[in-house]
Amino acid sequence: MIKIGIVGGTGYTGVELLRLLAMHPQADLQVITSRGEAGRPVADLFPSLRGHIDLAFSEPDDDALKACDLVFFATPNGTAMKSAPVLLAANTRVIDLAADFRISDQAVWEQWYGMTHASPELLPDAVYGLPEINRESIRGAMLVANPGCYPTATILGYLPLAQKGLIEGPLIADCKSGVSGAGRGANVGTLMAECGESFKAYAVAGHRHLPEIRQVLGSIMGGEPAMTFTPHLLPMIRGIHATLYSQVTSDTDLQALYEDFYADEPFVDVLPYGCHPETRSVRGVNRCQIAVHRPQGGDTVVALSVIDNLVKGAAGQAVHNMNLMFGLDESMGLDHVALAP
């Protein structure tokens, strides 16, 4: 059994992580921390976990966390980078679901996140936790930077084209997310009366996930691509839909390319030619569904990529990384069927 600690288990990502770990046959939850909810039973805050999680939230305690084999940080940006050095020194592995270790360039990270990085010495050792590209590195990692939700959907949609060197010119990523991506904190903009029956773009001038996407694709393409990334807020709870545009001058059979590329990936499903994936088809599961189109047989490729932002875009991917780090079957605790309707 893997002794597990969770720092910051009170948000949407935290409760999703708890849900998945409660059903994982090798997960032994030892400690769940929250300064604001210390002493309160987890099942009191989240009744959905009654009968599954018997622990209470506790104040963060380095000694308790160092006794774990693995600690997940489901915390705001800027938290894990302060605590990770102590845990790593105690040989406790760390998976950060926030952005503290996703960007390898310290100056770029500080530019986009507006704070000084507390542990820049760890950036070279952090492994970007997208199993579809870093599977072997994740297996031996002590520190894993779990990818963002938008980057997961976007990178997976572009990945076959990037790997085969087929992308020509700038990329356009037109992405939409449900409101759970904004977190559980009170915010006027995500009130039902504010976002219901409405649809809008945001952060058009620049979103923090843009440098993350460009960094990963750039490492594959031999240079960061020019990209326009525009996120939108959808009046729904879960899900990301990424409509991804690129120019491709090759006459490659794109359907065969995508099917062959992802044939052995347990959590990427390439739909048959002509399909249009829907966010409801991946609700509650660690799966990305992709369809690729070439309208009118022209040079523009349109890849459609959907995920559940809380699962494949966060907690599910973190559990996938855990499975790899501890030599378990990749699908352990994640082989679920999407909710319908």
Image: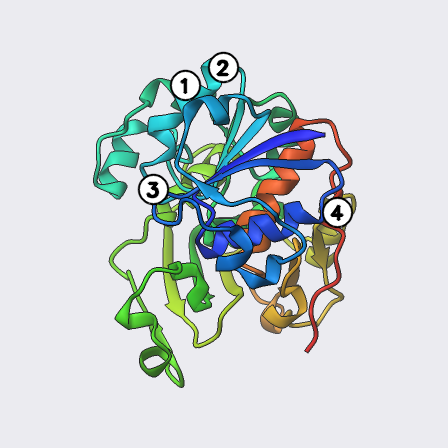
Examine the image and state in which quarter residue 135 appears. top right
Q: Residue drawn 76% across and 52% down?
A: 335
Using the numbered discs, state the Cα–Cα distance from disc 3 to disc 4 in whole angstroms.
29 Å
Q: Give the number of the mark in front: 1 or 4.
A: 1
Examine the image and state in which quarter residue 294 appears. bottom right
The foreground one among 205 and 313 is 313
> Which mark, by number, is residue 266?
4
> Which mark, by number, is residue 90?
2
* Vertical relation: 334 (above or below) 239: above
Whether pointer 1 and pointer 4 mark residues with C-beta atoms closer than 8 Å, the reply is: no
Using the numbered discs, state the Cα–Cα distance from disc 1 to disc 4 in whole angstroms.
34 Å
Say which amino acid is labelled 3: Asn
> Which mark, by number, is residue 86?
1
Quarter of the picture holding the N terminus: top right
Q: Is residue 226 left or right of residue 127?
A: left
* Vertical relation: 39 (above or below) 203: above
Q: x and y percent of residue 22 in the render?
A: 67, 48
Quarter of the picture holding the C terminus: bottom right
Residue 247: tell me if it is visible: yes
Neighbours of disc 4 within 10 Å: few (<14), some (14-19), many (20+): some
Badge 4 element: loop
Badge 2 element: loop
